[in-house]
Amino acid sequence: MSNKSSYLFILFAVLIAFVVFSSEKEYFSLLREPMKLSLPKGFPTPAYNFQKNKLNAKVFNLGRQLFYDPILSADGSISCGSCHQQIAAFAHIDHALSHGIYGKIGKRNVPALQNLIWNTSYMWDGGVNNLEVQPINPITNPIEMNESLAHVVQKLNASVKYKTLFFKAYNDSLINSERLLKALAQFTGLLISADAKYDRVMAKADTFTTQEQQGFQLYKVKCANCHPAPLFTDNSMRNNGLPIDTALHDDGRATITHQSGDKNKFRVPSLRNCEMTYPYMHDGRFRKLKEVIAHYNNQSKMERNYDRSINKIGTLTAEEQQALVLFLKTLTDKTFLYDRRFADPNNQ
Amino acid sequence: MHRFLKLSAFTGAIGLLVVFYSFYLIKRPIRSNLRINIIHLVGNRELKLDSVTYHNGLNQAYTVSKFKYYLSNFELINSNHQAIPLGEYFLIDEEDPASKKIAIKNLPSGVYTGISFLIGVDSLHNCSGAQSGALDPINGMFWAWHTGYIFFKLEGKSTASKQAGGNFEWHIGGYQEPVNCIRKVNLNFKQKKSSSLDIDLDLVADINNLFTNPKVIDLANFSSVTGVEKATTIADQYSQLFYLR
């Protein structure tokens, strides 16, 4: 009898611990009204706040439905989630260049979607200035979803499902592009990754192995200039020295500004979850992290106007390169990659 | 005696009320409206889309198929030279006659000597994310890949154009230096206007001005202006486009 009650006690304690533990990792709750975002410890003030797009579980849910619905594409064949997969931190695993409608291939590698509210610009060329208007690009791009925003609004208005979801979210049945885009922004804006092993080590709840620790020291000296913690990007546009791909001829930032000094500059991506976001670089030319490190390790082969802060890297030994890869893998955040609130609602 | 006091107190109170009410009537702000009738001309004639061939300052023949632009951030200038902001965003489209009659309700009271407004959309509203109404991106006046509104569109055909099909196309936008195409227009009224009455204005845009003032525009060199290059040149032209009739 006493044995049974002690089992019960242990079970209860485990449950309590689980609740306390999991609530610590939650930056928002869909069950609490009003919905509130608590930023991960040590993260800076976000560039996008939800002041004019009040967080609400029903709007978030609408955004999630839209994100996974091919209704956004011209022929109903692809959704945002087709190319932005949760297991890859919402990048496209194993695809170098983005795939679009009718099997078309795009010009750039699908970027991860994580910690977007801290971005000061969006897209590889930084051409987009606000999280809310970013989705207009894939929706209207002829080799991505090839749809018009007006027609998407029309299709949503004709859908009983969305009439209901918009009504639930906004308390009236108006469906317009502003509401569509704001709902998407609630979903994508809450894709927050800040619970990797690295974060737990920083919070003194875990420890690095010797090699991870060595990699961390190297990261701080060699990589943190452009990829500073906790976001692991400084949000800047830089030329990372990749030799120009003559088939793609992508001028990067210069396609936006038409300034020759911006040629071959691209947004510095975050290193978070990089174990899962392969292949790498704006054109997906590297399949493995060690190839990326090998690129930075050999400045003599770089495009001549490469960002000179790369010189800090100098030359890494094989052992150092391996340690660096092991450190980068501590940035993998399984809490984020398996958070059911971000999963396809149709597969649950 | 007692009754007399009571009566005079009563009439006094009524009298005071009457006095206060008449003060209120005099001081009460009268809510009048600003109504602007926008007129699109080419020279002396009303603009006709597609069907009429016009000639610019270099005698180059052209037709107009689209004429569409933003006017925003209206201000009235009072007799103390202060600008009284009225706000508002309007998308004017030759194809949509209703869009050429705009109104701003409930004017602040005052005597006004002129009006100002922006051609385009202020920088803040180019960075404000998803918006509706005049600023809804479905209106076809929004660049998705390089976020920002297209302030001004003029499209048509010209024998001078070097584009396919003889088309010419001006899509002008950009809210940041060095490509800032927002232009402020200041226009004086011929006579002072009081907000005690509705203010009615005829605002004229003469497309001929686009080709002649301040520069003479050669459609051979300006047949396609849709990005960063040459945009500010066209913006300077449209800054001189409007006048009050």
Image (cartoon, rainbow, N blue to C red):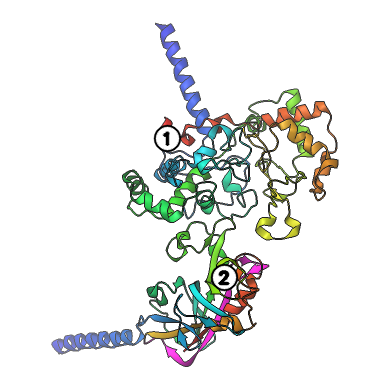
Q: Is residue A215 above or below residue B217?
A: above
Q: Nearer the viewer, residue A274 or B93?
A: B93
Quarter of the rendering occupied by the C terminus of chain A: top left
Q: Residues within 10 Å of mark 1 (few under 14, many from 20)?
A: some
Q: Is residue B37 above or below residue A287?
A: below
Residue occupying image coordinates x 53% and y 34%: A86
Judged left or right of residue A317, residue A114 is: left
Residue tagged 1: A345
Q: Secondary structure at mark 2?
A: helix
The spot of residue B125 in percent (x, y) is 53, 64
**Residue B219, quarter of picture:** bottom right
User: Which residue matches tag 2?
Assistant: B166
Q: What is the count of numbered marks?
A: 2
From the viewer's side, name the closer residue of A46 and B7: A46
Mark-to-mark CA distance, 2 and 1: 51 Å
Residue at x 58%, y 40% (from the top left corner): A40
Residue drawn at point x = 43 percent, y = 89 percent: B193
What segment carries the magenta color? Answer: B170-197
Percent x, y for residue B3? 13, 87
Query: Magenta segment, principal secondary structure?
Result: strand
Is B187 a magenta residue? Answer: yes
Res B100 visible: yes
Residue flagged by tag 1: what amino acid is it? Pro
